[in-house]
Image (cartoon, rainbow, N blue to C red):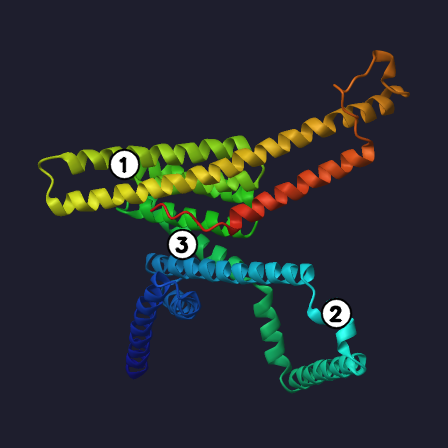
Amino acid sequence: MEGTSNIQEKTECEDLQRAYELESVGKKNLLSENYADAVADLSEACQIFSELFGDLSEKCASVQFAYGSALLGLAREESAVLANEGESSDEEEENPSKEEEEPSKLGKNGEAGKLDKQKVEKKSVEQVESEKTEDKEENPNETLDQDEEEDVSNLQVAWEVLDLARQTYERLYSNGEEDAGKKLANTLRALGEVAMESDNYPQAIEDFGKCLEIQVKVLPSDDRAISETHFNMGSAYSCNGEITNAISSYKTSISILEEKMSNLKKEASSSETEEAAKKAAMEEIEDITRVISDIKERMEDTVEAKKEVMETIDLVKPAVEKKVYSAVFGGDMSEFGETTSGFDVPSIGSAESVATSSSVKSVNLITAVKRKAPVSIV
């Protein structure tokens, strides 16, 4: 029995050593934005730590946070690729090929050539499908495993592991553990970003709100991390159609950065500050100035979106009022001397088309917010 116990201890020790090595390499890949390799390394590290200590162990939380962040980064990369492919497809539809534009240049064998090409393409597709079918028949279990893996998205796994880290950090924070508050806030911020990528904007707003509650308690009032969370909150509000709240969050984000910049200027102008520190302060001031400009641009886009929505509402409102009156009282509103300030009241059909146009604008706003390069505040 003692020999068996020693072997088990040695195996666990080797597994733990490998987990630490994988965690170290995975976090380096995460910092260098090599998300695919980071996911592979951190996934295995998470599995080993969980088997040795349990999912809610303090030793698992750090690697769970890193793994979730890597999955989020990978999901964003994949989303960007799909967005670019969609844009390329739209461009191809707008600019048809020369063959389609100039059929006369195909010559006598033009149509035959096209048909031969279609036959070859069809045959290739059939061959591929046949090969896939054969593979499935030979390895049915492997196919099932692949299907199950594809069903679970990177964002879903990211949420699950980040939520495990959140539970651990919440417990440590409530017990007064040093630095647990900052780690909990970072985890809540990451959960909010996962919700944003998943188009779950109310959940993102909730997560960012919880993050802010902790940040204001554990960080200085001019910390750039607080500004970043307010900015993220503004983006979530914007995508959720809460334009007034979005603008308010953007303004708060800017005011925190302005406070930080003011404090840095004082530090740089102080005679007690060393030259190296003065140089670093001036460089950070330049960086903050750039960030504030980026946030103001995002805020202007949001204000413009709100203006378009209000204009649409004003255009649709007369037609909606007319429809409601007709439904309740019958007849029309001519007995009240209905006027439209010199403009034709749109028909119900056109009102619906305007409403559809508003929906499209909202979708375009969300797409613009998500596709814009993230404003790096911290």
Sequence-first disc among 1 and 3: 3
The residue depicted at 21 percent of the width and 42 percent of the height is: 281
Which tag is nearer the camera, tag 1 or tag 2? 2
Task: Look at the numbered disc 2 and give the secondary structure of its residue.
Answer: loop
Q: Quadrant of residue 83?
A: bottom right
Hey, which residue is sitting farthest top in the picture? 336
Residue 75 is left or right of residue 223, and the answer is: right
How far apart marks 1 and 2 lie (CA) works out to 61 Å
The image shows residue 272, relative to residue 20, as above or below, that is above
Residue 135 is left or right of residue 206, and the answer is: right
Hey, which residue is sitting farthest right in the picture? 331
Q: Tell me the amino acid under the disc marked 2.
A: Glu
Q: Which residue is mark 1?
A: 261
Q: Position of residue 89 (x, y in %)?
A: 64, 62
Q: Tell me the amino acid under the disc marked 1.
A: Met
The residue depicted at 43 percent of the width and 50 percent of the height is: 190
Q: Quadrant of residue 115?
A: bottom right
Quadrant containing the N terminus in the rendered view = bottom left
